[in-house]
Image: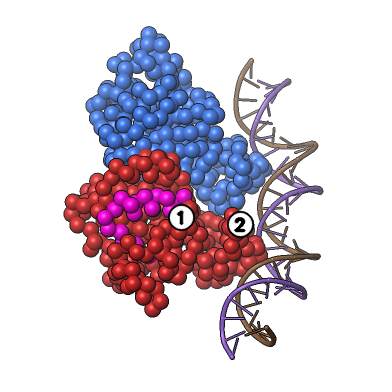
Chain colours: A blue, B red, C brown, D purple
DNA sequence: GCGTAAATGTTCTTATTTGTGTGAATACAC
DNA sequence: GTGTATTCACACAAATAAGAACATTTACGC
């Protein structure tokens, strides 16, 4: 996977970084991404476990905060940032989304924590990525993937490129698959909080052959501020729980595949 | 990589520079990039380690800020700041550079830790900023300043936009003042380690009415790999210590103002 | 030019890290 | 429960990095 083998400390950083964003790592994932044997990864994990940096489990490791939620939740309720909400779900979704990525393709990644998780997993695949999100771009910067950013003004809660310049620049790219993130999904389609960002999302939809939405279950049935696009035209929704009969029917009617990812 | 062998101090600079941006160097990487034997690099690293400029590990070295996080990780989880080398000097330089910024202007910021410090201070000034550096852009994203990024491929030790697309997009901007960062200054002008980045720097120089270099004193007299620009054409150099009579004379001959910032 | 000291390179040995094959342990479906 | 597929851990082999001692080159004074 990697031409270069990562050194001990780099692997440690990789492991802890993934743990921080996704809450979970597998031995095989680290092995693949760092170019070492699973045995070596196990030794790394065991080493980190003795220092309480992670919880060792069969097949991988967990973030120490996942120790046992029941005990600590009451004492320290707000330790998990917004990005850490439903980590397992986001991770499962991102993992599933990987199946829609083929070598050599140009894919577009939207904003949001799910996309950052996705970017993490995308790691060293042989693809080109375009994104407006600075965190997503930064995560991929040192990986094997080629990363492109449109030009334009930086704005938003999550630093990202937006505005008319960005939209114009996006027209220079031909995208195979766009992975959309959003804040709500209903029968009317996909929604977002920020009207500015929807312009970018709309542009990316226009430029892409395939469109796939990555949506965790908490967003079903929520129609928030700004409308991005109708369900029709999308190829698939990847989520982590059943969206309910009603929305399911609408998806089927609009020919949108429903994929429910289960935690590994 | 290099036909010429770098001297001890140049290697030292190279090592610290890479450490500053990536937090990690390998012996073999330095050996290749500086054209010396691995044995020599090890001696360099050991020497730097005794001065606490880095942490020696098997196969390479780490930035001192990565000094075993095991104890502090739980308390201080996200320490992204690796650019703490000569922080006082950088801060003084950045503070002084602020005097060259007027409200309403369009300024361009280069890459590097000095620029990140500068960006931090720039904070709530009423200016527009263009930069290729993702960390610089991220720092300014939530401030009052308007931040613009050219489009293009993300590459480099410090994630940044580069390549022909970026250079083309830069032509759309009219810049009042460009603040240059570099790895070396000599009578021949400004130098950098990476040939790719110099293209961007050259383009920014062309697009800017005023050019000011922010250079900490350790970089004087170092002519490293890639030439960026001659001294002539630059309006000022801001630094934190006296550059020595020789360089001082050259600056004067080329009509470049010398400003020495003192720590507050 | 020459001589000298410092810096760098070579060679060999030792230490550390990583990989491989084996059987045992674990999880999971039925 | 049983069967099956992973995953794990151990011992040893291989690869890689480090260190020591000595040879060589380079820089720089005169």
Q: Residues within 10 Å of mark 2 (few under 14, many from 20)?
A: some
Task: Name the residue: 30% across, 55% down.
Answer: B178
In terms of depth relative to the viewer, which is nearer, A59 or B237? B237
The main secondary structure of the magenta stretch is helix
Q: Earlier in the sequence, mark 1 or mark 2?
A: 1
Q: Nearer the viewer, residue B154 or A187?
A: B154
- The residue segment tinted magenta is B196-215
Extreme-top residue of the structure: A253
Label 1 and label 2 in one chain: yes
Mark 1 vs mark 2: in front: 2
- A23 vs B116: above or below: above
Q: Are marks 1 and 2 in contact (CB under 8 Å)?
A: no
Q: Which label number is shown at residue B32?
A: 2
Which chain is indicated by disc 1?
B
Q: Which residue is identified by label 1?
A: B21
Tag 1 secondary structure: helix
Q: Quadrant of the C terminus of chain A?
A: top right
Q: Chain of mark 2?
A: B
Q: Tell me the quarter of the picture where residue A35 sits.
A: top right
Residue D4 percent location from the top left of the image: 71, 22
Question: Left or right: A262 with respect to A3?
Answer: left
- The residue positioned 40% from the left and 76% from the top of the image is B246
Q: Quadrant of the N terminus of chain A?
A: top right
Q: Residue at x 57, y 40 (%)?
A: A33
């Amino acid at each position: 996977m990697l031409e270069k083998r990562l050194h001990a400390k780099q692997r440690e950083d990789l492991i802890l970084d993934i743990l921080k964003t996704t809450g979970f790592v597998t031995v095989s994932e680290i092995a693949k991404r760092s170019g070492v044997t699973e045995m070596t990864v196990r030794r790394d994990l065991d080493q980190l476990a003795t220092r309480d940096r992670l919880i060792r489990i069969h097949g991988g490791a967990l973030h120490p905060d996942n120790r046992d939620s029941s005990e600590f939740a009451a004492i320290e309720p707000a330790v998990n940032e917004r990005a850490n909400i439903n980590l397992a779900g986001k991770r499962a979704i991102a993992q599933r989304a990987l199946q829609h990525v083929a070598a050599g393709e140009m894919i577009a990644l939207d904003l949001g924590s799910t996309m950052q998780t996705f970017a993490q997993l995308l790691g060293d695949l042989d693809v080109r990525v375009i994104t407006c999100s600075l965190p997503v771009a930064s995560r991929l910067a040192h990986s094997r993937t080629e990363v492109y950013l449109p030009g334009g003004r930086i704005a938003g809660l999550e630093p990202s490129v937006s505005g008319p310049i960005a939209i114009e620049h996006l027209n220079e790219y031909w995208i195979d698959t766009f992975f959309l993130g959003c804040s709500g999904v209903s029968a009317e389609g996909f929604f977002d909080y920020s009207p500015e960002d929807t312009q970018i999302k709309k542009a990316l939809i226009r430029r892409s052959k395939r469109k796939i939405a990555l949506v965790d279950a908490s967003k079903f049935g929520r129609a928030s501020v700004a409308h991005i696009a109708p369900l029709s035209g999308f190829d698939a929704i990847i989520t982590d729980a059943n969206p309910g009969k009603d929305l399911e029917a609408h998806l089927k009617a609009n020919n949108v595949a429903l994929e429910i990812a289960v935690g590994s």
